[in-house]
Image (cartoon, rainbow, N blue to C red):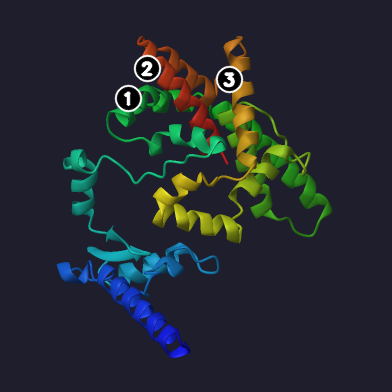
Amino acid sequence: MGVETWLLLVSVVVLALWAYSRWRLSYWSSRGITAPPALPFLGHAHKIFSKTQGRWVFDDEVYTKYGGSTFCGTYEMHRPVLMIGDPDLIKHILVKDFDHFVDRRTMKMQHESDKIINEVLVMKTGEEWKSLRSIMSPAFTSGKIRGMFPLVCDIADVLVSFSLKQAATQPYVDMKDYFGRFTMDTIASCAFGIECNSFKDVNADFPNKAAAFFSMSQWRFLKFLMFLTFPSLCRVLKIRFNPPEMDFFEEVARETVAAREKGHKRGDFLDLLMEARDNQNSPNNKRKGKHCLMSCRTFACP
C-alpha cells in the first residue's frame, strides 16, 4: 500500500479512538451531572495523579467550581468517579444505604510477592469483608487503644530529649524531620513491636524501608495507572505492584508474630490483633484472622 493509504488508515484509527474516548467521557454529561473539562483518554488522571501538584489542589478546584460541594463527576482515564460533598448524601451512602455501597474497588494481584496484599481488609468484599471486619473490630475499642498510650509517651520523651539536645548545639532544628522520626518510631513500636530508634540511628532499616516503600517512581506510577485502568491485563501478566521493601515488612511481621506466640507480650496493637484473632471459636475464622493480622501489619504500617 502507498503512503497515502497508510496515512488514511492511521487517520481513521485516530479519529475512531478519539470518538470512542469522547463517548466514554460523556458519561456524566449524558446524565445531567456537572464534570470538569476532561482530556481525551486521560480524563482527569493527569491532575489526580500529578507528581508536581497535590491531589488536594484538584479536589479543591472541583469542590469550589464544579459542584463538588454537592456532587459532581470526574474521570480516572475513562472510569467515571462521582465526587460527593453533601453531608446528608454522604450520610446516606455511609450509614443509611450502606448495604448498597459496602464494597470498595478491588485490585486483585496475581504476582506471588503481592498476594499477601490481597488479604488486607480493604481489599475484601461481601461476606469475606464482613467476617474479617468482625474479627478486627474488637481491637479498635477506645479502651484497648488507650492501653498503648505509654508506648507513645516513651517515644515522645525521646523526641523531647533529642530536640533539646539538638537545640543546644544548633541555631535551628528541623522539626518536620524530628516528627517524621517520632511517627515512624511510634508505628514501629505500636504496630510491629520493634524499636527502630531512628533518633539514635538515622540509617535504621525500618524508616529507610518505609521511605522507599512510599517513593513513587515513574515506573511504579505507570503500574498504578495500569492496575486502575487495565486490571485484567495486569492479572494476566502477573505484574508486581509493590516494591521489594514489602518483603521486608512482611518478614518483620512474621517474625514478630512468631515471637508473640511464644509468650512475648508488649500490650501494643499487634497484641490486640492477635487477641482478637484468638478469640474466634471457629477454625475458619481463626485462619482468616491470621491472614488479616499479617496483611494489616505489612500493608498499613509505613
Asked whether residue 69 appears in the rendered view, the answer is no
Place of residue 190 in the rendered image (x, y in percent of width and height, measured from the top left): 57, 29
SS at mark 3? helix
Q: Which residue bears the numbered disc 2? A: 285
Q: Which residue bears the numbered disc 1? A: 131
Label 3 amino acid? Val
Number of numbered discs overlaid on the protein picture = 3
Place of residue 207 in the rendered image (x, y in percent of width and height, measured from the top left): 67, 42
Q: Are marks 1 and 2 in contact (CB under 8 Å)?
A: yes
Res 43 → quadrant: bottom left
Q: Is residue 159 left or right of residue 236?
A: right
Q: Is residue 207 left or right of residue 65?
A: right
The crowding category of the residue bearing disc 1, from other C-alpha atoms within 10 Å (few below 14, some 14 to 19, many at least 20), is some
The crowding category of the residue bearing disc 3, from other C-alpha atoms within 10 Å (few below 14, some 14 to 19, many at least 20), is many
- What distance separates the C-alpha of mark 1 from that of mark 2? 7 Å
- What distance separates the C-alpha of mark 2 from that of mark 3? 18 Å
Label 2 amino acid? Asn
Q: Earlier in the sequence, mark 2 or mark 3?
A: 3
Residue sitting at x 64%, y 41%: 245
Q: Which residue bears the numbered disc 3? A: 257
Question: Closer to the observer: label 2 or label 3?
Answer: 2
